[in-house]
Amino acid sequence: ISNVETRLLKISPNPVTTETVGIPYSVGIDGNVSVEIFDQQGQLVRTVSQGFHKAGEYAPVIDIGTLAAGVYVCRLTTMQVSQSSMFT
């Protein structure tokens, strides 16, 4: 059993000032995890991570240089949790 809570952590930098952004998150129990980025219209623009994850902390850095300037929502989804965070 893990002492880690499943959640999105602080997206950095926010507001985005580079072509990359860190999307850190933690997973409390082993299982399927989806981390996705959506635009203001709710359209999926990037899949950060998808599939089976062991409990623990993850910190992918993704290239967002091809995305238009604007507000985006990052959503973490597991069987137990769905959590979102906005970034610009």
Image (cartoon, rainbow, N blue to C red):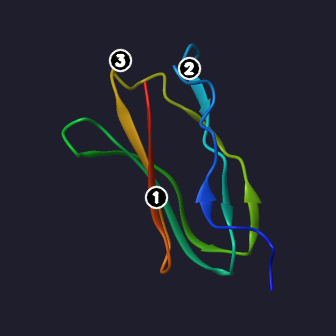
Which image quadrant is residue 13 in?
top right
Structural crowding at the residue carrying mark 3, measured as other residues with C-alpha within 10 Å and reported as few (<14), some (14–19) or many (≥20)? few
Q: Position of residue 23 (x, y in %)?
A: 61, 42
Which residue does the image show at 43% across and 24% down from the upper left?
88
- Answer above or below: position of 83 versus 69: below
Q: Quadrant of the N terminus?
A: bottom right
Which residue does the image show at 29% across and 37% down from the upper left?
39
- Answer above or below: position of 11 versus 53: above
- Nearer-the-camera pick, 19 or 28: 28
Is 77 displayed left or right of 56 in the figure? left
Task: State which mark lies toward you, 3 or 2.
Answer: 3
Q: Are marks 3 and 2 in contact (CB under 8 Å)?
A: no
Q: Amino acid at mark 1?
A: Gln
Is 62 displayed left or right of 69 in the figure? right
Residue wearing tag 3: 69
Q: Are marks 1 and 3 in contact (CB under 8 Å)?
A: no
Q: Amino acid at mark 2?
A: Glu
Q: Amino acid at mark 3?
A: Ala
